[in-house]
Image (cartoon, rainbow, N blue to C red):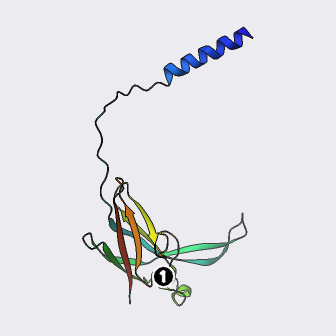
Amino acid sequence: MNMKKLISIITVLLGTIVLTSCLKSDLEELETYTNNDITGLVGVYHRYYGTDIIPGSGEVQVKQARLASGQFKADKETATCEFACKIPSNFPESEKNKFSMSQLVVVLNISSAALIEPIEGAPKLGIPGDWSKPNKYVVTAANGAKKTWTVTAKLLQ
């Protein structure tokens, strides 16, 4: 019993020494990121069900086709951005007549260390959502500053 108590005391003492931080107080305060902007468009995609079955689950495979995108414009003063997308020539023929702006997957770039959150019914980024109308997002900088952005998508013919 005494040996167990001694081992416990030694463990606590060693843990206290090993887990003590070497940092000193009053260190220089690092500046946090203040930008809360949408900086670019990563991609626009259309997801659809393929004909293949996934062997492990027996589910139908979900495929993704990238749309040609460009003409990204962002105005930091008015907190608006817009982009245009186009159905490319290599888009699956069987999906062209099923294509809808109300089922697009959009991925955007934002400022370093910022967070983005949809508001007023806007779709979450990275999952299918309705882009037939302007959508609003709140971008929060690392320092907590918020900016509400309006993002508009257009389909080029």
Q: Amino acid at mark 1?
A: Phe
Residue 119 image point, x, y percent: 45, 72
Q: Left or right: 128 with respect to 115?
A: right
Work out whether 59 lies above or below 33.
below
Residue to which mark 1 is pinned: 91
- The residue that appears at 35% across and 71% down in the rendered structure is 149
Residue 20 image point, x, y percent: 46, 24
Give 126 or 34, whichever is nearer the viewer: 34
Name the element at disc 1.
loop
Residue 3 image point, x, y percent: 70, 9
Q: Left or right: 74 with respect to 156?
A: left
- The residue that appears at 60% across and 14% down in the rendered structure is 10
Q: Is the N terminus in the top left, top right, bottom left or bottom right quadrant?
A: top right
- The residue that appears at 30% across and 59% down in the rendered structure is 35
Work out whether 78 lies above or below 109.
below
Residue 113 image point, x, y percent: 37, 54
